[in-house]
Structures are given as C-alpha cells and as structure tokens.
Image (spheres, rainbow, N blue to C red):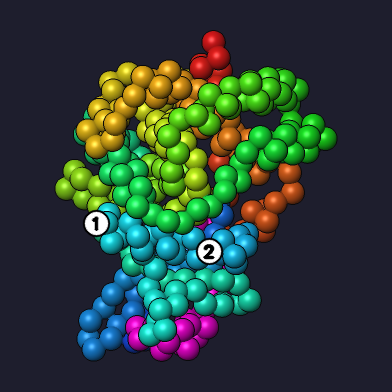
Amino acid sequence: MAVFTHVLAADLTAILERFSLGKCLRLEGISAGIENTNYFLDTQKNGDVTSWVLTVFENMAASELPFFVDLTRHLAEQGLSVPAPLVDSSGRALFQLHGKDALIVPCLSGQAKDQVDLNNCFEVGRWLGSMHHAVGTFGGHRPLVRDLSWMQGKLNALRDSHIARDDLALLERCVARYADYRQQLDACPKGTVHGDLFKDNVLFEGGRVSGVIDFYHACTEGLLFDLAVCANDWVTKSDGRYDRALMSSLLDGYKAEHAWSDQDEQAWPLFLELAALRFWISRLASKYLASYQQESVAGETIKNPDEMRGILEHLLA
C-alpha cells in the first residue's frame, strides 16, 4: 500500500523485542496501493532470516481491527494461505506505532500477475470457493460499509465537485438501479467476503494460488459479490467487455468448490453491476473529494475510475 506514515528501523526496537523477532535487517516501504501504510520487514534471530510485512492502519477504526485479525487467523487454521498476524506472548496482535494501530504479518511467497490466463482464473475461482466454505464456520461479523446510504452520501458530495456531467448522470442512474434491485441480491446467500480480490491481492507460485492478501474490505455480504469483484478485474478487456473464456474458467473454478444455484445464475449480472458501481464510486471519491490518500508520501494512490465506468456501460448496454 502507499506510504503515509514514515517509519524508521529504530522505531521498531521495542516491538521486535515484544514479538521475539530479533533484529531488523531491512525496512522498505511498499509504494503501491491506496489505503494503509505497508513496509517489507526482514528480521534475523539466531542466524535465521524471516520476511514479514508491517502494516500501519491509516483510516480504520480501532474497534474494527480485531475482526480482521480473527478472520485471517481462522482462514489460516482452515488451511488457506493468508497473512494471519503475528501475536505476542499474551496473544495480542495489534500494537501502536506513531499513534496508529499496526500489526505484523508473514510475507507470503509468490508473485501477483498483471496478465492472467485460463489456469490463473480457474485457480483463483477455486480458491475463492474454498474460502467461502471456510467462512461458514467463522463466527465474526462486520457490517457492510458501502451500502445504499454510503452510495447516496458520496453521490451528494460528488454533485458539488468537478465531476464530469456525463459521469454524474450515469452515476445517478446506477445508484437508482441499485435501490431497485438490492432486495433481490439481499435474498442470495451471505457470508464473510474478501471484498477486494483484485489481481494485485493474489499471489501465484507454480501455477497455483500461494497466498491472498489485503482482507481489509472484508465484511458480511452476498458471496457472489466477492466473485463479481474478482471477475471485474480478472476477466475484463480494455473496453469493459468480458472475456468469455476467462469468465468461464473463473466460474468453473468457483463451482468446483462451491454450489451454484438458479438463484445465483439470475443474480449474477446484478452482482457484476454492483461490484463495478461500488468501486467506481470509491475511485471517483478518491479523485474528486478531499481524502487522506492525497497525503501519501510515496506511491500512486488514485486508481482510474474509467475502468469501472467502462464495465457499467457494457453491462447496461
């Protein structure tokens, strides 16, 4: 993620001692991303070098953070490769750094892919189906943040911004549509979703998913919303249209691990629309409204809203 909070190795001395990590060998800011501050952290203890990721939370309530700790630890216990936080001798994962909440997670192996193929799509679909099974025994709950009220609030704020008039007109149409179809989606199976399964959050090694990161959009939502977020990034062309072969592979992977009902089939196009709409709104807000993201000291923080607009235009054509 982008670097908003500057951290020095000297700032970590007491923290490394608390978590019995030894000494710091490397602390390097991760410049890509848009929300939290992240650093690569290498430590050495008894001659062994271990790689971690230090995360400093920039814009999240402290009361919400235990949910993410519990979720990733639950998924790790279920055999999924996720960055479950390191805990100290008292079982605590969170700590304070420069007055902000922070934690340390393992640095997972593998690389994210900019360009994906049929196998990648099948594998990420299968991973997501496995995750949706695993969350069936997870007792945590986090309410949906980006609901209709959130959409309407951002829409009202954007009306007073420099947003293009045609963007505003399409946005108003899409929010009105969601107000009409949301009850249909609310009737679909719900559970804890990742919520942000873009290509840069999935690591591959040897053709298989070796890790999934960045669970900080996780909440209780329709399970197919998760798959739709993934589809809108993984299987779309530059013009916003879907690659049919990649889409089929993604869905085949998901269906190999999770049931797919007639209700799911009917709701699927609307979940695709909703996923594009939510991320379009968030990107428009980052571009046109005042945001802490504008305070980043390193890295690109604003993603192109037009990518999501293109998907919406295709879906509504």
Secondary structure beneath dot 2 equals: helix
Q: Amino acid at mark 2?
A: Leu
Report the residue marked by disc 2.
Answer: 65
Residue 44 lies, with reference to residue 224, above or below; the image says: below
Q: Is residue 291 left or right of residue 41?
A: right
Cα separation, mark 1 vs mark 2, equals: 22 Å
Q: Tell me where residue 118 appears, x and y as whole percent.
A: 24, 29
Q: Residue at x 62, y 38 (%)?
A: 147
Q: Residue at x 42, y 63 (%)?
A: 70
* SS at circle 1: loop
Boundaries of the magenta span:
1-21
Q: Position of residue 186 (x, y in %)?
A: 53, 31
Using a 10 Å C-alpha cutoff, classify the residue at mark 1 as few (fewer than 14 neighbours), some (14 to 19) or many (20 or more): few
- Quadrant in which the C terminus appears: top right
Asked if the magenta segment contains residue 90, the reply would be no
Where residue 79 is drawn, which disc sits there? 1
> Could you tell me which residue is drawn at 61 percent across and 46 percent down?
145
Measured along the vertical axis of the image, is residue 95 above or below residue 46? Answer: above
Q: Is residue 218 above or below residue 46?
A: above
Dot 2, how many residues are within 10 Å of its Cα: few (below 14), some (14-19), or many (20+)?
A: some
